[in-house]
Amino acid sequence: MTENRIQGRTVLVTGATAGIGEACARAFAARGARVVITGRRTERLEALAAELRGDAGADVRTAALDVRDRAAVDDLRDTLTDEGFVPDVIVNNAGKARGLDPTHAGDPDDWDEMIDTNVKGLLWVTRAFLPAMVEANRGHVVNIGSTAGRWVYPNGNVYCGTKYAVKAISEGINVDLAGTRVRVSSVDPGLVETEFSEVRFHGDTDRAAGVYQGYAPLRAEDVADAVIYVVNAPEHVDIFNLVIMPTDQRHSMIVHKELD
């Protein structure tokens, strides 16, 4: 059996109200971590926290948080520090896609939302919590990237740009931490069936469902397993980048589908 190196660690998961973030929160709690779950939908956070406390007996904190709000992120850091709940693992999961249009027809409001969440939000959270890890000379930053940060696809323009930025920022953080024991990992999934497409298409559930027809996409739990794998590695091992795709996908634009 693989050694559980997660037991007792304190883990902050952003965007934990659904999808990959929720799955990560469940996976860490099941392995005995203390978990801080954040997101914008307070009712979902509280319901998840109650479930984790009841099922796993987990030590869970909740915080309503929009990662785009730098002051709110800093306030959360101060609150957790005062409570002795300083994270030594960050899972920067909060992110979104908005729209699927060519650049010349894109909605600048969608662009703002993606850039502010996927890039600036990741930076605000990392900047707030990383100094304590550096001071302790121990910790782990896990950024949820995407295969969209490796291969641009039609009409993905700005979303892909934000995920390329996540890739570059992850590499930059990793280099900056040379000489410390703080690790950095980027987990980059391909097609995952979550609320992602529903958000991208502004609530158009029929269009969102069509994205996942004819093949077996990843589940949020599959990505959470990958996150657990990199965090649970021995401390002298830094799994910097892990790409995970469904077997039916071999590239952002190569997906085997069997449609009636």
Image (tube, rainbow, N blue to C red):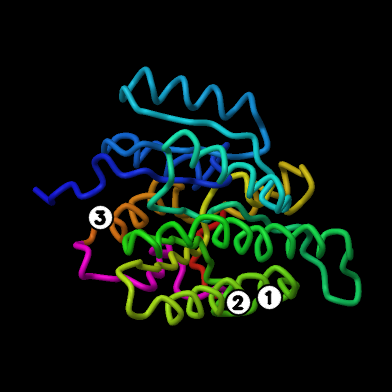
| Label 1 sits on residue | 161
User: Which residue type carries mark 1?
Assistant: Gly
Q: Quadrant of residue 28?
A: top left
- Residue at screen point 79% across, 60% down: 99
Label 1 residue SS: helix
Q: Earlier in the sequence, mark 3 or mark 1?
A: 1
* Residue 236 counted in the magenta span: yes
Left-right relation of 32 to 213? left
Q: Earlier in the sequence, mark 2 or mark 3?
A: 2
Dot 2, how many residues are within 10 Å of its Cα: few (below 14), some (14-19), or many (20+)?
many
Percent coordinates x, y for residue 153 in the rendering: 65, 76
| Label 2 sits on residue | 164
Q: Quadrant of residue 128?
A: bottom right
Mark 2–mark 1 distance (CA, rounded to whole Å) = 5 Å
Mark 2–mark 3 distance (CA, rounded to whole Å) = 26 Å
Observer-nearest residue: 54 or 138? 138
Label 3 residue SS: helix
Label 2 residue SS: helix
For the residues labelled 2 and 1, say whether their Cβ atoms are less than 8 Å apart. Answer: yes
Q: Quadrant of residue 163?
A: bottom right
- Residue at screen point 49% across, 27% down: 48
Q: Is 247 rendered above or below residue 103? A: above
Q: Main secondary structure of the magenta part?
A: loop
Percent coordinates x, y for residue 80 in the rendering: 50, 39
The circle drawn on residue 30 is: none
Mark 3–mark 1 distance (CA, rounded to whole Å) = 30 Å
User: Which residue type carries mark 2?
Assistant: Tyr
| Label 3 sits on residue | 232
Dot 1, how many residues are within 10 Å of its Cα: few (below 14), some (14-19), or many (20+)?
some
